[in-house]
Image: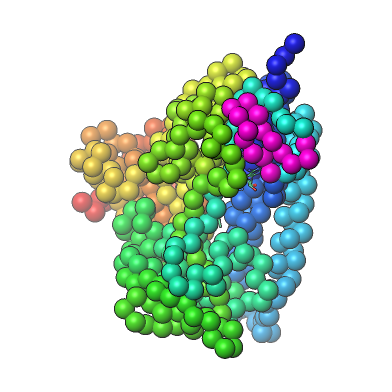
C-alpha cells in the first residue's frame, strides 16, 4: 500500500507551478496543484500579459501623432480607461479558465485554496483533507516590496495599477528597474503627466551602460519627467485627496497616484516554512541545488521564490527540469547562459548575453560594434526617437557574446539572435548573413567597423 496519496503537490498555480504540474502528470505522476488567488499567477494576472496589453494601448497615441505625415487626417482621438480595463479583465478571465482547464485535462487535481506546509510530506488546504505527498514543489512566486517611508500607505504597486478607478492626471513612478520604466512608458503614452524618481543617475541598473544611457535619454525625450539621483522622502495626503510627495533634498511634486516599483520579494506568506527544513540563501530566497531541491529532500522550489532571473520562461524551464528529474527519467541542470530578456519600455529594449562590462571582465579582449540611426518609419512619422544596436564579440574566438537593442520590436528581433548565439554565433556568421531590407534588424548583419 502506497503511503502517499500524491506523488507531487504543487503550491502555486503560476508560471513555474502550472508547467511542472502538467508535465509531471504527463509522465504519469499523481499530481495536485493548489492556487489561492488566480490561475496563471503573476504573469497572466498582474504581470507580463496585462502589461503588454496596456503597452499596446499606449502606442496608439504615437501612431495617431505620426499618421498625418503619412497622409491620414484624424478627428481628435479619445481614450477610455474603463474600456481598456474591462477588455483586459475579460481577456484575463478567459486565460484563467484556460489554465484551469489545461491542468484538469492533463489529469492534475486542481485545488482552489491556500497551501500550507505541515511537514515535509503534507500540505494543508482549508476545507480539504490534508494532502499527503511524496514530493512538494514550492512555486509561490514573489510579491511587490515597498520600502519604509512616511506615507507609504498611500502608494500602489504593480498589483493595483491595472485597476486604478480613474486614469490619474499626474502619476509618479518610484524605481529604476524594468517594471518602473515599463509603467512610466505606458501611462505617458496614455496621456498621463508621468514622472519617475530614481536614486541612480541612469535607469535599468543591470543592463549594458550604453543601453542605459540611450534609454534614459529616449524615455525623457518621449515626455516622461525624470527625477534622477534622488528618492522619495515622504508622502502627505492633501485635503483634496491628492498626494504631496517630498523628495530627498527638498523638491516636491503633487501627484494623483504614486506607483512603487521598488523590487519584489519571495512570497512566503503563511506557507508554513517553519514546519520544514527549507533553508534560505543570504539573499533571503529559497536555496536550491542545480535540480531545484531544497535542503529538505522531499521539497523543491522554482521560479521567483528562488529568484534566478524573475522571468516567466525561466520559471517554466525550471518547472520542467523538476518534472523531468522526478518523473521523466532524469534531467540535466538548466543552462542559464545567454538568457534573453526584453523590457517593454518606450522605446523597448532587448538583450542577450554579456554587457560590455561583463564581457571585458570575462574575455579581456573584445570588439564592439554599435549603430544608432533613425528608423525609416520615423522620417515621415516625425518621431525623433532613434534605434540603438550593439554587438559584443570575443576577439579571440570571434564568438558573439552580447547583443543589445533599443528600438521598436527589440524583443522580436533579439529572440532570433538568442537562438543564433546559443548555436555558437560568430561575427563572421553575422557578416555572411544577408539582411532583410528595409528593416531595422538588417543593421545587425551590416555593422562592419568596430568602435574599438
Ligand atoms: C508587472 C510585472 C511585469 C512582468 N513582465 C514580465 C515579462 O514581460 N516577461 C517575463 O518573462 N516576466 C515578467 N514578469 C515576471 C513574471 O511574471 C514572473 O517571473 C513569473 O510569473 C514567475 O512565475 P512563478 O511561477 O515563480 O510565480 P507566479 O507566476 O507569481 O505564481 C505564483 C502563484 O502562487 C500563488 N500562491 C502563492 N502562495 C500560495 C499559497 N501558499 N498557496 C496557494 N497558492 C499560492 C500565487 O497566487 C500565484 O498565483 C513580470 C512581473 C511583473 C510583476
Residue 430 is situated, as x and y percent measured from the top left of the image, at 38, 41
Along the viewing direction, whichever of 421 and 287 lies nearer the viewer: 287
Q: Give the range drawn in magenta.
A: 114-128
Residue 122 painted magenta = yes
- In the image as oriented, which residue stretches furthest toward the bottom? 239
Residue 219 visible to the viewer: no
The residue at 50%/69% (across/down) is 152
Residue at image coords 31%, 58%: 210
In the current view of this chain or complex, which residue is farthest to the top? Answer: 1
As drawn, is 273 to the left or to the right of 357? right
> Number of numbered discs present?
0
Q: Nearer the viewer, residue 61 or 109?
A: 109
Q: Residue at 56% x, 34% y: name it.
A: 275
Q: Does the magenta stretch include residue 55?
A: no
Q: Quadrant of residue 135?
A: top right
Q: Can residue 202 be seen in this view?
A: yes
Report whether 365 appears left or right of 119. left
Percent from the top left, x then y, of residue 308? 45, 41
Q: Is residue 54 above or below residue 391?
A: below
- Report the residue at 59% width, 53% height from top: 48
Amino acid at each position: 500500500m502506497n503511503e502517499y496519496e500524491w506523488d507531487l503537490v504543487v503550491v502555486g498555480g503560476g508560471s513555474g507551478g502550472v508547467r511542472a504540474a502538467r508535465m509531471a502528470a504527463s509522465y504519469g505522476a499523481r499530481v495536485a496543484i493548489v492556487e489561492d488567488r488566480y490561475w496563471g499567477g503573476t504573469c497572466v494576472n498582474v504581470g507580463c500579459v496585462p502589461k503588454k496589453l496596456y503597452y499596446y494601448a499606449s502606442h496608439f497615441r504615437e501612431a495617431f501623432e505620426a499618421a498625418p505625415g503619412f497622409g491620414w487626417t484624424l478627428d481628435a482621438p479619445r481614450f477610455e480607461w474603463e474600456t481598456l480595463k474591462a477588455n483586459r479583465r475579460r481577456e484575463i478571465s478567459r486565460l484563467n479558465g484556460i489554465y484551469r482547464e489545461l491542468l484538469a485535462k492533463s489529469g492534475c487535481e486542481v485545488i482552489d485554496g491556500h497551501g500550507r506546509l505541515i511537514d515535509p510530506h503534507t500540505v494543508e488546504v482549508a476545507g480539504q483533507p490534508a494532502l499527503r505527498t511524496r514530493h512538494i514543489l514550492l512555486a509561490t512566486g514573489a510579491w511587490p516590496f515597498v520600502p519604509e517611508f512616511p506615507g507609504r500607505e498611500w502608494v500602489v504597486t504593480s498589483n493595483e495599477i491595472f485597476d486604478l478607478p480613474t486614469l490619474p492626471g499626474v502619476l509618479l513612478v518610484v524605481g529604476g528597474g524594468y517594471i518602473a520604466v515599463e509603467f512610466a512608458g505606458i501611462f505617458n503614452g496614455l496621456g498621463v503627466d508621468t514622472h519617475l524618481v530614481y536614486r541612480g543617475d541612469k535607469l535599468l541598473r543591470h543592463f549594458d551602460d550604453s543601453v542605459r544611457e540611450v534609454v534614459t535619454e529616449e524615455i525623457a525625450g518621449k515626455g516622461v519627467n525624470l527625477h534622477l539621483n534622488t528618492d522619495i522622502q515622504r508622502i502627505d495626503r492633501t485635503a483634496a485627496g491628492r498626494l504631496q510627495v517630498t523628495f530627498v533634498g527638498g523638491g516636491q511634486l503633487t501627484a494623483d497616484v504614486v506607483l512603487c516599483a521598488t523590487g519584489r520579494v519571495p512570497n512566503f506568506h503563511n506557507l508554513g516554512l517553519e514546519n520544514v527544513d527549507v533553508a534560505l540563501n543570504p539573499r533571503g530566497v529559497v536555496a536550491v541545488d542545480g535540480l531545484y531541491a531544497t535542503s529538505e529532500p522531499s521539497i523543491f522550489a522554482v521560479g521567483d521564490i528562488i529568484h534566478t532571473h524573475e522571468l516567466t520562461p525561466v520559471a517554466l524551464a525550471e518547472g520542467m527540469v523538476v518534472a523531468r528529474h522526478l518523473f521523466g527519467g532524469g534531467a540535466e541542470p538548466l543552462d542559464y547562459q545567454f538568457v534573453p530578456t526584453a523590457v517593454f519600455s518606450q522605446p523597448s529594449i532587448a538583450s542577450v548575453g554579456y554587457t560590455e562590462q561583463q564581457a571585458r571582465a570575462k574575455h579581456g579582449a573584445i570588439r564592439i560594434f554599435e549603430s544608432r540611426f533613425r528608423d525609416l518609419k520615423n522620417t515621415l512619422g516625425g518621431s525623433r526617437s532613434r534605434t540603438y544596436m550593439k554587438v559584443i564579440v570575443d576577439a579571440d574566438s570571434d564568438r558573439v557574446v552580447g547583443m543589445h537593442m533599443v528600438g521598436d520590436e527589440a524583443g522580436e528581433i533579439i529572440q532570433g539572435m538568442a537562438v543564433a548565439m546559443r548555436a555558437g554565433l560568430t561575427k563572421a556568421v553575422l557578416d555572411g548573413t544577408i539582411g532583410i531590407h528595409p528593416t531595422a534588424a538588417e543593421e545587425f548583419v551590416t555593422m562592419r567597423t568596430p568602435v574599438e
